[in-house]
Amino acid sequence: MKVVLAFLFLTSAVASLATHSDPRSLNDAPIIDLGYAQYRGVFDPVNNLTNYLGIRYAAPPTGDLRWRAPQSPVGNSSIVQLADTQPLPCFQAVTGVAPTNPLETRASAPGNPIEDCLFLNVYFPGDTVPAESLPTLVWIHGGGYIMGGADQYPGSDLMREANNEIVLVIIQYRLGLFGFLAGSEVKEDGDLNAGLLDQDFALRWISKFGGDSSKLNYLVRVSGAGSVLQHIVAQDGQTTPQLFRGAITSSTFLPSQYMFNDSIPELLYSEVVTQTECSSAADTLACLRAVDATSLGVLNNNINAGGFFGTFLFVPVIDGTFITQRPTEALKQGKVNGQALLSITNAHEGTIFVNQVDPITNVSLYASMLFPKFGSQQAEETAQLYADLGTPVQQDGLVMGESIFICPTYYLMTAFPNSGWKGEFAVPPATHGADVVYYFPSIGVPPFPNPDFLAAFQGGFMSFVVSQDPNDKIDTTITPSWNLYSEDNTEMIFNQTTDYQPDIHINSTDSGLLQRCSFWNSVGALTVSSAGAADNGAPVIIDLGYAQYQGAFDSTNNLTNYLGIRYAEPPIGDLRWKAPQSPAINNTVIQQVNTQPSPCFQAPAGTASSNPYKLSKRGVDVTGDPTEDCLFLNVYFPGDVVPTVPLPTIVWIHGGGYLGGSADMYPGSDLIRESNNGIVLVIIQYRLGVFGFLPGSEVKANGALNAGLLDQNFALRWVHTHISKFGGDPSKVTIWGESAGAGSVLQHIVAEDGQTSPQLFRGAITSSSFLPSQYMYNDSIPESLYSEVVSQANCSSKEDSLACLREVDATTLENINTAINGAGFYGLFVFIPVIDGSFITQRPTESLKQGKVNGKALLSVTNTNEGVIFVNETNPMNASLYASEVFPRFGPQEANVTARLYAPFGSLFVQDELIMGESIFICPTYYLLNAFQDNAWKGEFAIPPATHGNDVPYYFPSIEPPPFNNTDFLAAFQGGFLSFVVSQNPNEKIAPTVTPYWERYARGNTEMVFNQTESNQTDIHDNTTSKYLLERCKFWEGVGHLTAQ
């Protein structure tokens, strides 16, 4: 059977064929035995054809078969069924909120729509089955996938126009939510795109009416033409057997075609479930299958009517099997079924789909409404592209018409370079559907009923059906020779002159239109989402084994982010103060991770009048109140698809004194941008304060010490296992933190005696390494802290105090956390890492001395005046007393030596802040550098006032504008870090900067100083570390057994 697929306009809907046919003689109609049934048709002597109306091609898609692939009909061949009545149409719906529905039926159907509607009509010439096989035309009706039926199209019209040289089949298929309900539940226990599968099943049915299966053609309109496009790209262009040789599209319809589990299809599914009161059902799809069809039909209509004006809600999705990727991508790749294509568009496709009464006159807003995945950038680009093309309403019409109808037609043409022809219907008003009456003049009289024009217009299609070439005319017409579209973008224009004569001529496609189509093609991932497709699209669905996550594409920054991925089980109940555990498996649904995770419980530092680590939103809203269930992370990668070449990966560990901070504080887009889109980024959260760092023998015996560090380690192992799924390279991980985040990096460097297996990172960056006193877990100070918590929680009398603490509600524990931390010495932090004997086996400074380190390369930066914000400026102490307060194990000798070392530096406040800054931040950085010997680089951030944390806005300028907002400085400062991430060497620059050659620290104690001149110019130069500073650091290292560092 030589089959052509044809399609129908959204606006096409006509009266029953019965109203166009004369009385029939049943005696002359052949009986066709289909195996499962016998059918006798009707001979139409007026049109000299035989028609078989209402042949069942599939079992009723009702009950358990609702939302399943069509099944073969049950056998019933014992009687001859009369196929003499138009089939009842499938359930219908209306579009958008149009005051006049562009898809409204022009005449009543012969009966009410029903769910049992999988029927088709067959027409062949004469009163006997043709002896020679004829080319076959399959007409797929349109209607936006929500309306239409076989009864609307008089088959006699196409038969007459083909000079009775074809066999014609007109099919029905499930519509609206009956045919295109999407979502994970349908994927799991049903079949997506049931309406398309109905069409495919009907194509496989065709065989026994004198048609030639090798000459099967599609001819269709709007959703019908959209359906043809779907069959062209179905199964990656490898449909077996090939079901058609040629395809005709009249107004190709390609609305947004999302991945089946994208947030929009999932929301539609949820809306259906909610409105049917199935939300509480354990199996929502089974519940929906039990809903009566009439109720579902009403719901179908209501949901569709609530859509945006002129758009359609229940449409095809990317299902991963029948439709494997975005249709435009399949067309680009030449993955197509069929051998030849004839396509026609109307000059003004979009007009009837735009609200003319209450229009949206802001074109960028209209584009955003039409394509919800658009960001402001794409919306503005759209407005600029169409700014000179008429009034705003006309621009809206062009946006709709070109993006959804006209441009997809040109994408089709490029997929058939040597066998594609293009036409344009331009007879005024040339709006969508205006050409339908020229195919089916029995529907209504064509406004331009010129016989020469009709013969020429109709003849092109029918000639193509017969020979696959519109120039092999079945009759002589006035149409000049068609050129292949690939020959200079040539198309045939069908118009009329001002004096009502035919005007049929060839023309080259407008270059401006093709440029706009190029734009629409470039934003295809946003107009026709393909999240989760195997080889393209965004946002991708990532299957982690225990869960599936779908992120969000940030078009403004051209990156995809996954916000709030759970990497560990909630550390609550019995898991409080235990090592993190793998999350429970929950991979039956796709989880949308497009919202920042709630932070872990927070606490203030010491009794600081201004808390340097207070929780700051830093321009990013926290999604909820702090919570104990907070072990989440964010992942960012550049672009809208997973990078195909694995990228170096940063794991950012936030600071906050081990008692504050969260993932939402740091805009990942900044680091991605600074890397020239050359990295994948992970930002993690971990337990803080008493929840993450409760010490003591009881915790050692029946829990896990340093739970917050173990969370970080668990997250790093998560990265090692899963980051490749996001395009990251697990062998090129760099961990980076600031303040307590940098202190955490130091902890992971010395963890497990530098023998962590597998190695979880190759490079480390510390910005203000934070190393406060790190006592043995059962030292008197940690034990007294544990006792204080037990006392305040009223657990002192309990035999198992830790079990009692695990039963304390989180809010009460958070209040204790805040009270104890707030009572600490000014600028100090109470709940911090301890030496636990397993993860951290000894004082970190000892591990560094011994070279027991994880990682291969180090880049460290400190601020010139690290200690300032941690010292009470209004009530400074003399240096010896201050040293004794900071380090309670100091005796008079160590306190006095400290006072002598810092006496030359002026006021008590300056001495105190230098003691704080050097002992806890600056000197530990030099210990780190020495441990990495010849593979370490050191920087100093010196932009005044150069206090602790002043460098953060220079990494994350979205937090707040950097005070020295010099382009050259920013590129140089940021570039050093990101170059190190990529190559492990800051001199291998990812982009040219003003930074001079950066010498390794071991070669002359050289560090790079980042400053500004008095005239506000960039001042970046190398410098040798002060020998006096190094002498003071040697002192601090020598008293490490007392400072507990």
Image: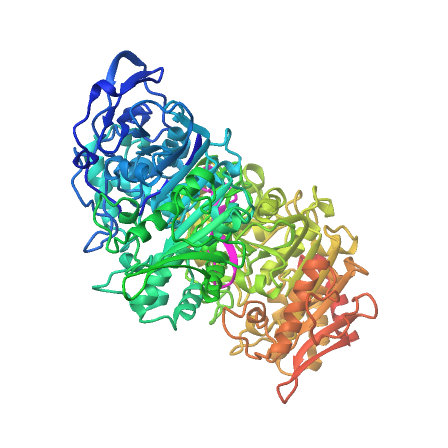
Residue 803 seen anywhere in this rendered image of the structure: no
Span colored in magenta? 549-574
Q: On the rendered structure, is 789 left or right of 418?
A: left
**Tally of marks:** 0
Residue 128 in the image, given as x and y percentages of width and height: 32, 22
Quarter of the rendering occupied by the C terminus? bottom right
Q: Specify the farthest residue to the right.
A: 1003
- Asked whether residue 933 is drawn in magenta, I would say no
Residue occupying image coordinates x 57% and y 78%: 965
Return the residue nearer the eye: 348 or 160.
Answer: 160
Return the residue nearer the eye: 243 or 515.
Answer: 243
Q: Quadrant of residue 766?
A: bottom right
- Asked whether residue 564 is drawn in magenta, I would say yes
Residue 652 in the image, given as x and y percentages of width and height: 59, 57
Quarter of the rendering occupied by the N terminus? top left
Q: Specify the farthest residue to the top.
A: 78
Q: Is residue 873 above or below residue 63?
A: below
Q: Is residue 743 above or below residue 460?
A: below
Return the residue nearer the eye: 839 or 430.
Answer: 430
Residue 988 in the image, given as x and y percentages of width and height: 74, 65
User: What is the basis of the colouring in this image?
Assistant: rainbow
Q: Specify the farthest residue to the bottom.
A: 1015
Return the residue nearer the eye: 30 or 789.
Answer: 30
Q: Quadrant of residue 188?
A: top left
Q: On the rendered structure, is 882 left or right of 237?
A: right
Residue 568 in the image, given as x and y percentages of width and height: 51, 42
Q: Is residue 972 above or below residue 798?
A: below
